[in-house]
Image (tube, rainbow, N blue to C red):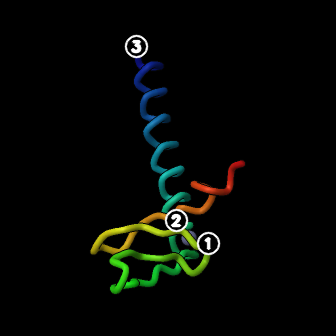
Amino acid sequence: MPLLLLALALGVFVYFVWRARTSSLTRDCRWRQNRSEGLWRCAYCGAEQAGEVMPRQCLRGQGDSRS
Ligand SMILES: [Zn+2]
């Protein structure tokens, strides 16, 4: 059915738009490497991520914000 194919294409399109919007938030994130502690810290939201490579996404809203 062409309608099913159209729905699938629409779903993929929406997914990519959603992904682009999500990744655009990364620009607000200011990751600063803390080599002494071996982690990256976001100066914008205070999120922390361990590793050598700079994180791509903002972790704001995750973690200790929920009670
Ligand atoms: Zn952040």
Residue 61, x across and y down, in percent = 63, 57
User: Of residues 5 and 44, which is closer to you in this image?
Assistant: 44
Q: Are marks 1 and 3 in contact (CB under 8 Å)?
A: no
Please state which amino acid type lies under the numbered disc 3: Met
Q: Residue at x 35, y 86 (%)?
A: 36
Mark 1 Cα shell of 10 Å, populated few (<14), some (14-19), many (≥20): some
Q: Residue at x 48, y 34 (%)?
A: 11
Q: Report the label total.
A: 3
Residue topped by disc 2:
58
Tag 2, which secondary structure? loop
What label sits on residue 45 in the rendered view? 1
Under 8 Å from ligand 1: the CB of mark 2? Answer: yes
Q: Residue at x 53, y 61 (%)?
A: 59
Under 8 Å from ligand 1: the CB of mark 3? Answer: no
Residue 19, x across and y down, in percent = 48, 53
Residue 52, x across and y down, in percent = 27, 74
Tag 3, which secondary structure? loop
Reading the chain from its start, which is encountered first: label 2 or label 1? 1
Q: Residue at x 40, y 13 (%)?
A: 1
User: Of residues 24 and 46, which is closer to you in this image?
Assistant: 46
User: Of residues 19 and 54, which is closer to you in this image?
Assistant: 54
Mark 3 Cα shell of 10 Å, populated few (<14), some (14-19), many (≥20): few
Residue topped by disc 3:
1
Considering only vertical position in the picture, is 28 above or below 58? Answer: below
Q: Residue furthest right?
A: 67
